[in-house]
Amino acid sequence: MTPLYYGVSVVLIGWHKVFGAIFGQHSGVSWVLSIVFLTLTIRALLIPLFVKQIKSSRNMQLLQPKVKELQKKYGHDRERLTQETMALYKDTGTNPFSSCLPLLIQMPIFLALFRLLSHAAKTKSLESAKSIGVLSSADAYSFAKAKIFGGTISSSFMNADVTEVKIIAVFLVLAMTATTFLTQRQLMSKNMPADALSGPYAQQQKMLLYILPLVFAVGGIAFPIGVLLYWTTSNLWTMGQQFYVIRNNPAPNTEAFRAKQKRDAAKAAAKGEPVPGTAAVAVEEIVEERRPAQRQQPKKQSRQQRRTQGPKNPSPSSDSTDQGDNS
């Protein structure tokens, strides 16, 4: 964890120097904003991994019908099913583990920040303060004693003595839980095809949709306020980033994809341009209108049927001729 301590503390102290010059070096606002911008810096660095995560999740969703076919075909042979499934992922360039990369990379950073705050919480005086990373003993003491919302940044719901701090901690736990739930639900309800909502991958996502927020809610009461700020800010970033990707580059055959088609059609109509996707339909309609009606061919009849039916529109002259012939 030592390299992470240095990395996290470098970014944290860098932003603290910026905001400390504005609000004061020992101000709680300076430290809170430093944590927020530490989060934004980390998430900005993780954008390439987030793009891979979105592509991997989308491919996993779109491949679910083919995975179901493989399950029906090789369901009796688990080893062959695994081989064929992995071959399908390889041929389509899909990595099932890419969707976990941003979370896996964030967790050590989250733990490093948690340890920094826990270290700060144990600092009782300037003399007992210890440096960690590039966080000097003076910075650690300032970090530990910075006041925010009537308490300190290192306070948690479990160890807070001030009621206001407990209220803020509960609010941040609820915010962290809600943003975790809404982020996952946004992905499943807007950017997953209907046929991908019933496969094993979808069932796994539904379980995570409800289990992860509960885990964060239960564990959140022990998190320092600074950690809750970090995680809530990270969730809000994820929601905004995911909303942008789903809105502008949705997966095919999803609700977000149909909504984008409607927006594109409305923009094209407002500019007087052809509506995307309607040109081919218009051409087919014109060809159908210009195509001559097909002449109905008479049905073949036997000689006996023709004698029985007789002419359809006999003339009076022909009737008299027939009568003369009969007589």
Image (cartoon, grey):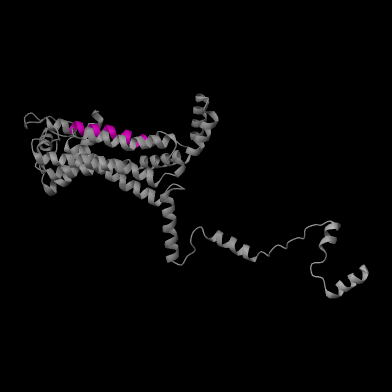
Q: Which residues are magenta?
A: 100-116
Q: Is residue 182 left or right of residue 61?
A: left
Front residue of 11/297: it is 297
Q: Is residue 104 magenta?
A: yes
Query: Is residue 71 shown to the viewer in this render?
Result: yes
Residue sitting at 42 percent across and 62 percent down? 267
Outermost residue on the front side: it is 327
Tell me which corner region of the image, top left, top right, bottom left or bottom right, holds residue 294: bottom right
Is residue 38 visible in this depiction of the protein?
no
Residue 180 among those drawn in magenta: no
Note whether 269 is above or below 84 in the view shown: below
| Quadrant for the N terminus in the image | top left
Tally of numbered tags: 0
- Residue drawn where x is 40% and y is 46% of the image: 191
The image shows residue 73 at horizontal and vertical percentages of 55, 31
Q: Residue at x 14, y 41 (%)?
A: 167
| Image x and y of residue 205, in percent | 37, 37
The C terminus, quarter of image: bottom right
Between 219 and 114, the residue placed more toward the observer is 219
Decide if residue 284 is on the left or right side of residue 308. Answer: left
Would you say the magenta stretch is mainly helix, strand or loop? helix
At 83% across and 58% down in the image, what residue appears? Answer: 305
Q: Quadrant of residue 235?
A: top left
Whole-percent x and y of residue 182? 30, 44
Q: Give the quadrant of residue 232.
A: top left
Q: Nearer the viewer, residue 139 or 316?
A: 316
Give how far across and how far down residue 226 sits, in percent.
18, 38
